[in-house]
Each structure stands twice: as C-alpha cells, then as structure tokens.
Image: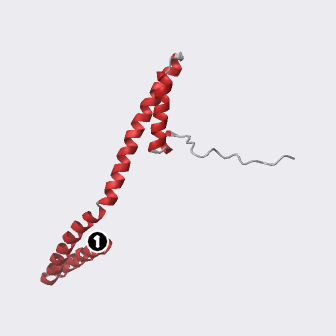
Amino acid sequence: MPPVRNKRAKKGTCTSIDTMSISALRKKIRDNERVLRTKRVHSAKGQVGLERQLKALKLMLIERIIESKEKKFTSKYRMVKHFGNRKKVERAIKKAERQVSEAQTPQEKESSKQKLYELQIDYNYIM
C-alpha cells in the first residue's frame, strides 16, 4: 500500500480576492496586465473576463491600501485621542461632584450620583 500524502494547498496560494494581501493583489494585477498585453488572440469572453477581473483587483487593492493606512494611523494616534478625552472626563467629574454636593432634592442628588458614576467608569476605561 503506497504512503498517504497530505493534500494541502501550496504555500502562498490564495483562493479568494478577499483574503489576498496587498502584495499578492499587486502580483495578480501585473499578471493580468501581462496576459492582456500579449499578442496572443483571446476569445471575446476570455478578454472581457480578464478585464473585469483586472478592474475588481484594482478596486480591491485601493480598498486594502486605505484599510492599512487607517489601521496604521489609529494605532499611531490612539494615545493622543485618549489624552484629550481624559482631560474632558476629569473636568466633567469635577463638575458632577459639585452638582452632587450642591443638590437640594433627593432626585437631583441621585441623578448627579448616577452621572458621576458613569463618568468614573469612562475615566477608568481611559486610564
């Protein structure tokens, strides 16, 4: 009995455009452009299919580049955003503490305490 071999896909092959990396998309675009540039005669359906695939690949590449830039910037400027929010929440906490101490009716006091509690949760998240 012959040995059983693993039937795994080769490394680096992607089956779907959605799962391809930016470099894989660029390679696929270059390949399609080369095929379309050759002097060989293609059937009309084949030609149209390749052109459609090329347009889809270019759109997907643009989307991927935008996603990667957004991801890079969100990680880069994340702390700056939290510093601004921290100051804002600290000011709001001080204001809410003043409202709790200055509240005259029990309803005002309860609503102010609830608001203060929510602000403290936000502050803990930021920290």
Assign the C terminus to one quadrant of the image. bottom left
Question: Percent x, y for residue 60?
Answer: 42, 39
Above/below status of 85 relative to 64 = below
Pick out the residue farthest to the right.
1
Q: For the image shown, how many numbered marks are present on the structure?
A: 1
Residue 62 lies, in percent from the top left, at 37, 40
Whether residue 33 sits left or right of residue 83 in the image: it is: right
- In this rendering, would 56 be left or right of 2? left
Q: Say if residue 82 shows up in the picture.
A: yes
Say if 54 sits above or below 78 in the image: above
Residue ID for mark 1: 122
Badge 1: residue crowd in 10 Å (few <14, some 14–19, many ≥20): some
- In this picture, is 116 found above or below 8? below
Q: Check the image and name the residue furthest to the bottom.
A: 101
Q: Residue at x 45, y 30 (%)?
A: 54
Q: Residue at x 50, y 45 (%)?
A: 19
Is residue 40 left or right of 108 when viewed as pictured? right
Residue 74, by quadrant, is bottom left
Q: Based on the displayed image, in which of its 4 quarters is residue 126 positioned?
A: bottom left
Residue nearest the observer in this picture, 23 or 120: 23
The answer to whether 75 is drawn above or below residue 61 in the figure is below
Residue 102 in the image, given as x and y percentages of width and height: 12, 82
Residue 49 seen in render: no
Amino acid on which disc 1 is placed: Asp
Colour basis: secondary structure
Residue 38 at x, y percent in the picture = 50, 21
Q: Quadrant of residue 94?
A: bottom left
Residue at image location 55% in from the left, 42% down from the top: 14
Q: Nearer the viewer, residue 72 or 105?
A: 72
Task: Tell me the SS state at disc 1.
Answer: helix
Is residue 89 shown left or right of residue 2? left
